[in-house]
Image: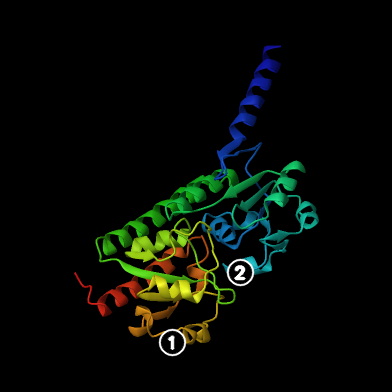
Amino acid sequence: MRLVLGCLLSLFASLAASQVSVTDDAGNVVRLAAPAKRIISLAPHATEILYAIGAGERIVGVVAHSDYPPEARRLPQVGGYNSVDLEAILALQPDLVVAWQSGNNALQLNKLRKLGLSVFVNEPRHLEDIPKIAVRLAELAGVRQQGVAFAGQFNRRLQDLRQRYAGRKPVRLFYEIWRQPLITINGKHLMSDVMRLCGARNVFADVPSLAPSVNVEAVLAAAPEIIVIGGMAEERQEWLDAWRRWREIPAVEGEQLYFINPDIMQRHGPRILEGAARLCQLVEQARQALGGKQ
């Protein structure tokens, strides 16, 4: 009897040790009986984070545009981030779905939960959030050490950038995500945190919507000193040229019109520090052109 009881206690202890539990960015507690072995990523940036923490081999499905690292291109796709294929997700039998709060369809995420799937929602709004998300995903995937290592490296690079650009004279910046309609970001967006890191002020920081549509008149009134274009991966020279007619905008008058590859700026993953370093260089160029050297 004692032997049986001892075996049962040992079994229960083993099961308890294998369970993992974290709280996601929506405040939901995500519990798994064991580390996830079959993960579906519903955002390109989440795919990049999973690979960065050594959980890439556990990914069984992704959404469109999950193209980095190159291995991700070979994975089955389950639709786009704003409209996923629920049947395709179920067919892949995931034990964890990594979702994007502001990018995925909330009704579809609720449907996945009702179908019994474990959903971890991430929503980085500050650069420091990315390593925190990485550590929690590493816990769920059973690769905690790799997650902690990634977080440490990310935070060191971030701190280097903070020290390099601290105390610089502010520069007014307009970031164009898309041309027609003309879309930008507000102050709660992660990219606004990148701007603050570089000593730039988002001219549309106070707009309520996370990714608002604006018009040319609003940009004229905001008088940005630097304009940065995103869009898709390829450079959009015609978007830059479209601003050149508005010589009353300080950024145009001072020839401070730039493009940054959105893959390293608009994705909320590990490569955003590359985008941050590039943006800080451009903001510094504009600062020098404006006579703002300190």
Frontmost residue, 147 versus 280: 280
Is residue 41 depicted above or below 75 in this figure?
A: above
In the picture, the disc for residue 164 is none
Taking 81 as reference, is 285 above or below it?
Answer: below
* Residue 288 horizontal/vertical position (percent): 25, 77
Circle 2 SS class: loop
Q: Which residue lies furthest to the top in this view?
A: 1
Q: Mark 1 points at which residue?
A: 244
57 horizontally vs 83: left or right: left
Q: Give above or below for 113 relative to 192.
A: above
Q: Residues within 10 Å of mark 1 (few under 14, many from 20)?
A: some
Name the residue rendered at 59%, 32% in the picture: 17
Q: In this view, does 199 lie to the left or right of 56?
A: left
Q: In this view, does 85 lie above or below 2?
A: below
Q: Find residue 257 and report its image quarter.
A: bottom left
* Residue that extends furthest to the left in the rendered view of this protein: 294
Is tag 2's residue or tag 1's residue first in the polypeptide sequence?
2
- Local crowd size for mark 2, using a 10 Å CA cut-off: few (<14), some (14–19), many (≥20): some
Amino acid identity at mark 2: Asp
Q: Residue 84 at what x, y percent from top left?
A: 72, 59
**Residue 229: percent from the left, percent from the top?**
48, 76
Asked whether the viewer can see residue 116, the reply is no
Say which residue label 2 marks: 67
Q: How far apart are marks 2 and 1 (CA)?
A: 33 Å
Image quarter in which the N terminus is found = top right
Rendering coords of residue 38 (x, y %) = 69, 51
**Where, quadrant-wise, is the C terminus in this rendering?**
bottom left
Q: Do the residues labelled 2 and 1 touch (CB within 8 Å)?
A: no
Task: Give whichever of 285, 169 is nearer the camera.
Answer: 169
Tell me the kind of residue under disc 1. Answer: Arg
Q: Is mark 1 on a helix, strand or loop?
A: loop
Q: Can residue 135 be seen in the rendering of this structure? A: yes
